[in-house]
Amino acid sequence: APKKEPEATVKVALLIPFRGDQSYFDVVANGMKLVTEQIEGSETTIIEMGTDQSKWENFYLDACEGDYDVIIGGNWEATPTFEKVIAQFPDKKFINFDNSAAPTNANTYVMFYKANELGYLTGLVAGLVTKTNLEYSDDTANIIGAIGGMNFGGINDFLYGYIQGAQAVNPDVKIIVGYAGSFSDAAKGKELALNMYAAGADIVFHAAGGTGNGLFDAAVEAQHYALGVDADQALLFAADPAKQKMILTSGTKNVDLAILQAVERFMDGTLPYNTIEVLGIKENGVALAENAIYNALPASIRDVVAAYKAKVVSGEIVVKDALTLTAEQWDAILAAAAPTN
Amino acid sequence: MLANEKIFQAVKMFAAVLLALVLTFIVLLMVSDEPLRAFSLMLFSPLTKFRYFGNVIELMIPLSFAGLATALLFRTRLFNLGTEGIFYFCGIVTAAIATQTFSNSTLHPIITILISGIAGGLIALIPGFFRAKFKTDELVTSLMMNSILYGLGLYIIKYYLQATDVSGVASNLFQLTAKLPIIIPGTRIHSGFAVLIVCVILLYYMLFHTKLGYSIRMTGLNGDFAKYSGMNAFWLFLTVHFISGFLGGIGSSIELLGMYNRFQWSTLPGLGFTGALMAMLGKNHPVGVVIAAFAISYLRTGSDIMARSTDVPVEIVSIVEAVIVLFISSQYFLRKYHERALIKQGGSERA
Amino acid sequence: MNDNILELTGITKIYSNGVVANRNVSVSFRKGEIHSVVGENGAGKSTLMKMIFGIEHPSVGKIVYKGKEVHFANSMEAIKNGIGMVHQHFMMIDDFTVAENIVLGMEPLKNKIFLNKKESVRITKELAQKYNFDMDVTLHVGRLAVSAKQKVEILKTLYRNAEVIILDEPTAVLTPQETEVLFDNLKHFKEMGHTILFISHKLNEVKAISDRITVMQNGESRGTYDNKDITIDQMTELMVGRKIIMSYDQFKEPTDKAVMAFKVENINLNKKGIEVLKHVSFGVRAGEILGIAGVQGNGQNELISGLVGLSRFNTGKWFIENKELTSLTIEQKRHSGLAYIPEDRMKDGIAQGASVAENLISSYYKREDINGKIFMNNKGINTLANRLIEMFSVKTKSSKSKIESLSGGNIQKVVVARETNTSPKILIAEQPTRGIDIGSEEFIHHELIKMRNKDVAILLVSADLNEVMEVSDRLIVMYEGEIVAHFDTVKGLTDKELGLYMLGAKRQDEESIRRALTC
Amino acid sequence: MPDLFEIIFKPEFGFTVIRVVVPILFAALGAYIASSAGIGNIAMEGTMLMAAFVGTICSAIFQNPWIGLMCAVLSGVLMSLILTYFTLVLKTNNILGGIALNLFASSFTVFLLFIVTGSKGTSATLGAKTLPKIDIPILKDIPVLGTIFSGHNVLVYIMFAAVILVYFLMYQTPLGLRIKAVGKDEHAAESVGININRIKTIALVLSGVLASLGGVYMSMGYLSFFSKNMTNGRGFIGLAAAAMGHGNIWMVTITSFLFGAFDALANALALYALPSEIIITIPYVAVFGAIVIYSIFEWRNRRARGEE
Ligand SMILES: Nc1ncnc2c1ncn2[C@@H]1O[C@H](COP(=O)(O)OP(=O)(O)OP(=O)(O)O)[C@@H](O)[C@H]1O
Ligand SMILES: Nc1ncnc2c1ncn2[C@@H]1O[C@H](COP(=O)(O)OP(=O)(O)OP(=O)(O)O)[C@@H](O)[C@H]1O
Ligand SMILES: [Mg+2]
Ligand SMILES: [Mg+2]
């Protein structure tokens, strides 16, 4: 039965493949939550399209045929489908929440996040922590680790930033990078992390979605540090402070905030269509989760991080990205960063 | 009335579907505020729009190919679940060819599909050969091959086919000349559907009207008998594996050229088990497989529409599907009534 | 109170496929009698027994056992109540030992939990000795000869203290000597108070052992008779509706036997160190039937399966006329003129699930008359199938019926029809009438003789001595993988004497044996 | 970074292999029992997943990992009974039934997870209790052996016990003999009064119990939370190991360890600058190679016996 409710101020639909990775897509989905909470009278819908890409067009078409004011979709995988559908609905407004290319349609606004800068921030922390004698780190072995879900540009962008950040503050640091070959095998993530800790790393970062959840278990078991990604992942273990304190901080991709702001600008009429906006540290598109655990780190560490962060914001430091690297170039970078026997 | 086997089968099927739907409705009652609307969307929405019905057909194409590929193996009593890996890997073969420039838009897809098919056939020959020659358990080899092909495929993509303008695992865009044309405007039903129909007909005739089909069926029913009759299991297993791999390969290629703009599967597409499901629901008969694929596509399309238009969580879709599959495939559902009817009637035939 | 231990009243059994296997059957069994049940293939004998044993359940009717109506839900309940059954087809697990097979389901325990393997062996050994069965109970059943398997089956029922023992065609695979031993045992059991229900197609045996006989036809009982009140001919008439005389001499036409159609030279086979076949050589001429007699398990199986190409030999050559078959594929062998009626029709002879027509063409499915350029010629296949069905009077609803809906005898007719339809030069017929009613048996014998008369060479392997002696022109006897005797003619040969060769008690000189090849 | 050989030949590697092999070996044992009774239990994966979920949720609710373990085992029994009902009573093809149950489990767990936690990804926020690790008194002080065998999760020791128990069950008890009898020849088993359906039900339930132990290890031992589809095909690896064991429990165990060892090796190699896509295939290649070699061996035996 149709419900009788006052007319919504804005109706927003978000289309993503699925929720529940506890990182990227959940942050995106959180954008809808922020919209509901902060924009009075707004009505939001999250549509999970599933992983069968051939079906996505149906979902987009249905959303466009619905009575939504703004339709949010995209990311690199779905963008071609999204744009194909957008072309058929010139009267609607669209937000592509994450894509590296400018929109091909006049009624679309695109956002992009500098994952390399996110990685850079976590790299700074890792590079500093490993040469400090904290409770669970030591300065004897100058090794840090990072787990990638799979070996491709989007993931390597995080890792490349991480390598650059660590080396910026700790030129001799060696970085072990391992790929799990999956974004959903937490057990595999744990194994890789344990191996990294066993090989001397005392802090490990991940860009591996659900696989990365295993990292935190490994950190507790090995009694070393871990760094989260996309969301403030320490919140995962809110119920368990013993684990939580191992997750020093997370590099967050603030898609949720970006979405909220975009919807607000849509309502104000200030959203710049036919435009791509690239959101880095400066734009608060990516950041460090400066939670209680992070703030408990020695000021000496936090100050250095802040200083480098400022240099990136000012443009003094430009973090290189991995998106345009060939596989061979990337292999060479990894080999150079890896510890030698 | 129930004594008649055919009528009984029909009644049984109907009752099984009915029971499954009742169960589904009960589930919906529990999870939804608007169960009736959700239920009717699930059941009827594919019929409400031409485009939706098109979705059913679009989805049915890859399910059918995976089902046909698997059914042929099952018919020969080969328990091989390798369609999964073949679908994935042939997608990469497809990408390798479909991204090349080619002047002729009729030949481009044909060549791509054929080469993918041959690649699929050749891959299938690996477990096929070991099965035929050494009786190596094809369930084990095919499961292992799926994972091996996945890693190998990723490697090829990364080092040879990776698009530079995308941040994920993806090939460059397919050339427009390689894409399959849409044959029914207003939907995305592409010419692959026609290929499917042709394949089903060919496969049907091959199975039931040729010597090869005869030897496949006899081997599947009784391998000892086939051997005794002079059929050569070695070559037969190789042939069956090749044809199955070929069907998987062209299915994969057709799906990509029809529905995608580039290769961008970063995980196995999950068609191996779905293929086995189609094969078994369709009793390993080519036409049965297509009917099963249609039914499952219809159900999935309806459920998708239900899930995105109501408050019903998407996960319910698979739960409902599992329940329906379980009941429909029950051989002894209502069998008791059948037997009672038989006794009343005093038996239908003399010993 | 009467002395009936078991009474069946008004039993009707309809299988779920609609077949009426039994219709309103009433029969009673007395305590301590040997009661035979005879009837054509598919008359419903086995079904009736299975209902007594609780594996099948009557659709209508009641079973009274020891004065009480019983409804055995499964064989376990029947066994608990003292009913045992030896099935028509062996029901044993080849990978288990004799002892394991015997105790299975009622295993002796150690510490109340574990299998007591030693005790199993001890008990089964004792049991075997008690009933004069001599065997090694630690052997795997799969390696036993058929007659030994038979004994294991009987021991299984005795181990379970069966008062009523059902024997479904136990003698189909035994030699006369073995049958005699079995009968002695049965009489012994009878004296000990067991009731025996005995099924056989061999009416002379039935006559020899039974106290009473029940004749079945088409699922119905044609009455129960005291042995002395009924003759074999009367039984046959009740079952088949006519008299049957198993004598074929008058039908054998003279043939010139000029061509050596099939020649086998020096076959040897060694399996895991055991010499299974030793220097086997023989020849079969066009227009004659060479019988191979022998107790099962003396190498005949291996010989035939090697000759047709289902397995390998270590050495040896064989020829059709002058063409060597040795290393040809099965298809090529068949192409060269070899046809084969396999011993185990359900395993090798047919494909269950396929139609009668499909089963009628398997040996020559590539032949031109049933194939078009690309497609098989379904019309041609049907015409052919219908012709064969008519010629061999196979009882089936249509050529499209599933083969498994036919009775055993009719399935065998399908196999024979198919193999003879290949116009072979040599037909190897292995146990062609095993488990088949006398009507069908006679029919198949006539078919073999007809082929012989048309100058086909026939190699007949049978454990049924009457069969080899009635049908063959010449005869060889195999014992422990060797040919131990060769007879130019079967005239004047007695089954007693033949039995001596078969059991290894006698052996001809090398000269006579060599004539198997050269004659 | 240490040399690869250094890693493999350190006792810690042995410890790792054991840790990795647990879910696979449990699944393999379960599949072995089911297949001994003649049933291919494709539902292994789904059963594991369900148990992983139920275990951790119940552990969180009752704040007691042992209750979680019990509930997980119950869920395994329940899954098996559902499969039993459909395959034995309604005669659904067991493969079809298994696939349907897997489909069901992967969605149902996420659905319930969402209801319980509001998340579709992991149950980490629940902070469920995990099963304890155990140091084996004397053993832990023995140099190499102690490092390899001591200090594992309790389920590791249950796994070793399970191998022994399953061995005794299958080789030394009447039930085992009957399960094998049913698997080898149903009719023969029935003819001696064995209730086929009962034996099959027992076999499936046992297989469900073992699968659930493998599953619960994933969420309450290996890891400390449930995450979506966390079994990640381990049930199928177990199935493959059971198939490769050809009805011999030691072969089943060895195959599982073979896979586990190569999986651990792949995890170690993942840290070196090698193509990760190829590295992840190592355990699969190893099992593929092993089964091919094994079958060639068997084939030669058959040839020597003249069977082929
Ligand atoms: N399980 C079954 N399902 C359906 N029909 C069956 C089944 N078992 C037997 N029949 C049919 O029931 C009839 C009687 O079969 P049954 O085995 O009792 O015959 P029989 O007298 O023992 O024959 P034979 O001498 O060949 O052993 C046959 O027509 C047979 O095809
Ligand atoms: N429970 C069983 N189920 C199936 N087969 C069995 C069983 N027990 C033994 N066997 C078979 O019997 C053969 C010998 O078994 P096993 O090794 O247990 O005998 P054993 O050494 O004589 O026994 P024990 O050690 O108790 O004296 C093996 O081939 C095995 O397959
Ligand atoms: Mg350090
Ligand atoms: Mg019978």
Image: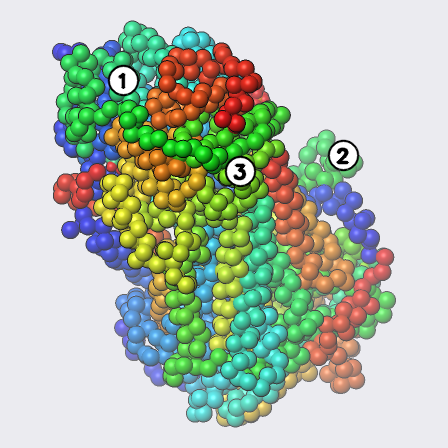
SS at circle 1: helix
Of the 4 image quadrants, the one containing the N terminus of chain C is top left
**Residue D9 vs residue A315, the one in the foreground:** D9
* Chain to which the residue tagged by mark 1 belongs: C
Disc 3 CB within 8 Å of nearest ligand 1 atom: no
**Residue at which label 1 appears:** C204
Name the image quarter holding residue A310: bottom right
Type of amino acid under label 1: Asn
Q: Residues within 10 Å of mark 2 (few under 14, many from 20)?
A: few
**Residue at which label 2 appears:** D141
The colour scheme of the drawn protein is rainbow
Measure how far apart labels 3 and 1 are at the Cα level: 40 Å
Q: Is residue C35 visible?
A: yes
**Residue at which label 3 appears:** C319
**Residue C502 vs residue C261, the one in the foreground:** C261
Indicate the quadrant of ligand 1 in the picture.
Answer: top left
Give the vertical position of A244 relative to C340 (above or below).
below
Measure how far apart labels 3 and 2 are at the Cα level: 74 Å
Give the vertical position of C505 relative to D96 (above or below).
above
Q: Position of residue D256 (x, y in %)?
A: 62, 43
Type of amino acid under label 2: Asp
Q: Are marks 1 and 2 on the same chain?
A: no
